[in-house]
Amino acid sequence: MKFSKFTKAFALAMALTMLLSISAFADSQRPYFFDFEQTVVNLAPGDVYTMRVRVYDDVEKTFSCYIRGNESKNTYVWSDFNVGWTTVDIHIGKDETSKGLTIYFYIDGTNTFDNIQVRIVDPANSYLLETRKNAEKIRKENAEYIENQKLLAIYYAKLEEKKLKEENEALAAYYKALEKKNKANQ
C-alpha cells in the first residue's frame, strides 16, 4: 500500500507533536521548568490558597520562593520545595495592605525563575464574600452529611447486632425445645 507525501508528512508531524508535547495548566514564561495551576490569583487579606505546581529540573532537587510587594510580615509561602509535583500554600496576612504582590519561583543553584501574580482584593467585595459563604455552607453540609452517615452506620450495626441476637436466642430456644422433645420420645 502506497501513501502520498502529504499523508507521510502529516503522520510525521502528528508523531512529533505527540512526542514533544507538554501539558501545561496555565501559561508560564518558562514552560519547560515551571507548570503552575494558575498564574494570577485573587485573594483577600487572611486567605490561604493552595495550588499545585510542577517544577522540572534534572540536576537540582529543590526550589525557592520569594515574595515581592507585600507589606505584611504575615504574608508567606509554604511548600516542601522539592522539584516535581508539589503543593504551594500562599498565606496572605490579615494586615496585608498592598494591592498585589509577585511570588518568584527559583530553581535552586540556577538562574531559572518564573513568577505568579497575587491580587489582593477587598474582602467586602460582594462576589468574593458570597463565594466564601457558599464554600463555608458546602463545607458545613458535607461535614453534617459525613456525620449523619457515621451515625446511620452505627445505628444499622446496632440494629443488625440486635437482630442477630434475637435470631440466636430464637434458634437456641428452638434447639432447646427440640432437645426436650427428643428426650421425651426416648
Image: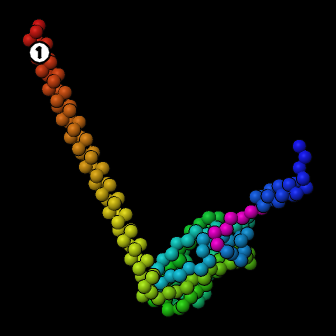
Q: Residue 134, relative to residue 117: is it above or below?
A: above
Say left or right for 134 vs 96.
Answer: left
On the image, the x and y values in percent for residue 126 come to: 42, 85
Q: Tag 1's secondary structure?
A: helix
Q: Residue furthest top?
A: 186
Pointer 1 local density, CA inside 10 Å: few below 14, some 14–19, many at least 20: few
Q: Residue at x 27, y 46 (%)?
A: 156
Say left or right for 146 vs 162.
Answer: right
Query: Front-most of 162 and 26?
Result: 26
Q: Check the picture and name the quadrant holding the N terminus.
A: top right
Q: Residue at x 17, y 27 (%)?
A: 172
> Where on the picture, by quarter, is residue 130?
bottom left
Q: Which residues are magenta?
A: 20-26
The secondary structure that most of the magenta stretch takes on is: loop
Query: Front-most of 54 and 13?
Result: 13
On the image, the x and y values in percent for residue 38 come to: 60, 74
Tell whether position 101 is magenta.
no
Q: Check the picture and name the quadrant holding the C terminus.
A: top left
Q: Residue at x 60, y 87 (%)?
A: 68
- In the picture of the structure, the residue carrying the numbered disc 1 is 181
Tell whether position 23 is magenta.
yes
Q: Residue furthest left?
A: 184
Q: Residue 162, relative to residue 129: is it above or below?
A: above
Residue 55 in view (yes/no): no
Q: Residue at x 8, y 11 (%)?
A: 184
Residue 144 in view (yes/no): yes
On the image, the x and y values in percent for residue 10 come to: 83, 58
On the image, the x and y values in percent for residue 163 come to: 21, 38
Say left or right for 164 vs 53.
Answer: left
